């Protein structure tokens, strides 16, 4: 099964993560290598800090654009990983090893092959 | 204690939960029904004891209330014909029993939880819930599983006990050794990894250490002549004794070789020594006695400032002979690395199945350490990365990152 790991980081991690925290980058590099060597890594996408983006809604024909993230919470989405694993339990093992699990939170969610097939089906039927 | 009904309920729940479940389930063969009935009895106690006062014999009161609930349920569901006689018998016995002590059937219950007909991975969770009354969410966190999935697996395991009509009995002599091993394994799994002298402590299970020690004491109380039960208790007591020294004040991981031995709890070590000697006197050596002896050798060596690595390597040899787990194989390699030199340790690591090694953090931590000692810097960097990437505990990760940073920097990156 494929799962996505949604990685939530506290604000101070976003501020310091690249320049002032070489240990965090070293931990992440080691984690990435372990994922690849174990043959579970499918893909990943680290994100810039939430204030660098914006959120769009079109409700009743009205556009609404707000600066920053969808919801203003203490921890914000900092990136995601897609893994190929035999079970959700194995996915949770990998989530626990994620360096950001110690300071933030890691949500594990199965991808939905059904919705994907419906959306990508060429005849729309 | 007697003045506070809620306090009494808490104490009875903690001390007697397993005994009450064991007694009810041993007579009906249905663990889930016993749990439901006892839960309702506790609810009734919280409602009526503050009003009417705490009964003279709280356990007997709970037993009677749970029994009534089981009878109601039997009537309501028109329970299967074959279950009725056992319910009737329960009623008769419980009536006779409420005036005196009821028998302790927990040993039978432990053997049911670790029965070969039940999925091995569920032995420990089942024991924790049925004997100690822990909730599914707590157990799920300890085993890093989703609480919903753990709840379902526990329900399935209990249904299996009922459907397979697993007998509530202590196995006879020739069946006993493997069945007792399963019970002790399940208790040790609750305790967590015993390999905390390698940089691979397993913090996810620390919360259950006291529960595991309590279970081991229970087994020993009911089977005092089983050397492996005593060995298991000794092993866990040694580990508990060193707990205060395993972290600094700020929570950083401290390897065994750098632990302040003054922080070790002497009385626990003394108790462990006594248990281990008593086990050895029975002349039936086994896995848990060997693991306890390893702890004893490490503690003795650290106190004297001179660790007998050859002796430790020999103990690991015995352990690999009786129970060749990944932990035993890696421990033997580490001991050989110290006793005979890094090259021998690395050769022992190379002999381990790569499938086992792949995601086993202690393997990579020991490998990194031995490669560093042998002066193979680039492969050591690589092994440190693997160990760091597989580490769950933040302070262990921090420790390994520091060790890795101490390696010479002027080596171009490359693979082993």
Image (spheres, coloured by chain):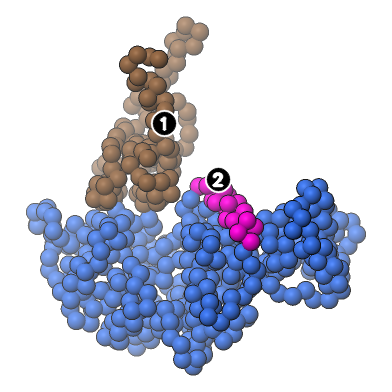
Gap in angstroms between the C-alphas marked 1 and 2: 19 Å
User: In this orientation, does residue B270 appear?
Assistant: no
Compared with B326, A4 (above or below) is: above
Which chain does blue denote in the image? B
Q: Nearer the viewer, residue B305 or B376?
A: B376
- The image quarter in which residue B17 lies: bottom right
Q: Nearer the viewer, residue A111 or B27?
A: B27
Q: Secondary structure at mark 2?
A: helix
Q: Colour of chain A?
A: brown
Q: Is residue B184 left or right of residue B368?
A: right
Q: Quadrant of the C terminus of chain A?
A: top left
* Residue segment shown in magenta: B146-165
- As drawn, the residue found furthest toward the top would be A61
Q: Chain of mark 2?
A: B
Q: Quadrant of the N terminus of chain A?
A: top left
Q: Which residue is mark 2?
A: B148
Q: Is residue B155 magenta?
A: yes
Q: Is residue B174 left or right of residue B62?
A: left
Q: Which residue is mark 1?
A: A112
Tag 1–tag 2 contact (CB < 8 Å): no
Q: Nearer the viewer, residue B266 or B273?
A: B273
Dot 1, crowdedness within 10 Å: few (<14), some or many (≥20)?
Answer: few
Residue shown at 53% from the left, 80% from the top: B174
- As drawn, the residue found furthest toward the bottom would be B281
């Amino acid at each position: 099964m494929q799962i996505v790991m949604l990685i939530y980081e506290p604000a101070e991690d976003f501020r310091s993560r690249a320049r002032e925290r070489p240990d965090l980058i070293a931990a992440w590099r080691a984690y990435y290598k372990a994922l690849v060597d174990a043959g579970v890594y499918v893909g990943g996408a680290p994100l810039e800090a939430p204030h660098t983006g914006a959120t769009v809604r079109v409700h009743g024909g009205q556009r609404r654009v707000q600066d920053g993230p969808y919801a203003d919470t203490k921890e914000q989405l900092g990136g995601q990983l897609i893994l190929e694993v035999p079970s959700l339990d194995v996915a949770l093992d990998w989530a626990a090893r994620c360096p950001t699990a110690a300071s933030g939170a890691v949500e594990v969610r199965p991808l939905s092959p059904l919705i994907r097939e419906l959306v990508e089906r060429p005849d729309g039927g | 204690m007697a003045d506070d009904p809620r306090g009494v309920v808490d104490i009875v729940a903690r001390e007697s939960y397993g005994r009450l479940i064991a007694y009810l389930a041993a007579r009906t063969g249905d663990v889930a029904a016993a749990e439901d009935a006892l839960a309702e009895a506790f609810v009734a106690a919280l409602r009526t004891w503050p009003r009417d006062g705490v009964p003279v014999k709280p356990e007997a009161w709970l037993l009677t209330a749970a029994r009534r609930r089981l009878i109601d349920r039997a009537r309501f569901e028109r329970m299967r014909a074959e279950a009725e006689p056992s319910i009737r018998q329960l009623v008769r016995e419980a009536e006779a029993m409420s005036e005196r002590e009821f028998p302790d059937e927990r040993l039978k219950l432990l053997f049911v939880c670790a029965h070969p007909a039940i999925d091995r991975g569920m032995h420990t969770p089942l024991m924790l819930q049925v004997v100690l009354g822990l909730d599914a969410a707590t157990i799920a966190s300890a085993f890093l599983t989703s609480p919903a999935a753990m709840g379902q697996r526990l329900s399935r395991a209990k249904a299996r006990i009922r459907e397979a009509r697993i007998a509530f009995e202590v196995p006879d002599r020739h069946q006993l050794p493997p069945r007792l091993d399963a019970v002790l394994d399940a208790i040790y799994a609750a305790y967590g990894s015993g390999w905390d002298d390698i940089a691979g402590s397993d913090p996810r299970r620390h919360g259950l250490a006291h529960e595991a020690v309590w279970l081991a004491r229970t087994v020993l109380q009911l089977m005092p002549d089983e050397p492996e039960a005593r060995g298991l208790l000794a092993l866990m007591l040694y580990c508990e004794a060193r707990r205060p020294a395993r972290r600094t004040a700020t929570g950083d991981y401290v390897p065994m070789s750098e632990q302040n031995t003054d922080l070790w709890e002497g009385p626990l070590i003394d108790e462990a020594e006594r248990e281990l000697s008593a086990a050895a006197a029975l002349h039936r050596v086994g896995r848990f006695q060997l693991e306890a002896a390893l702890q004893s050798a490490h503690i003795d060596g650290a106190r004297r400032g001179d660790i007998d690595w050859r002796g430790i390597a020999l103990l690991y040899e015995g352990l690999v002979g009786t129970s060749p787990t990944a932990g035993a194989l890696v421990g033997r390699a580490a001991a050989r690395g110290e006793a005979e030199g890094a090259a021998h340790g690395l050769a022992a690591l190379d002999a381990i199945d790569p499938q086992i090694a792949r995601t086993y953090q202690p393997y990579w931590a020991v490998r990194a350490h031995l490669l560093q000692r042998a002066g193979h810097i680039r492969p050591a960097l690589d092994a440190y990365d693997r160990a760091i990437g597989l580490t769950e505990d933040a302070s262990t990760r921090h420790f390994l990152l520091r060790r890795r940073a101490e390696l010479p920097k002027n080596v171009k990156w490359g693979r082993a």
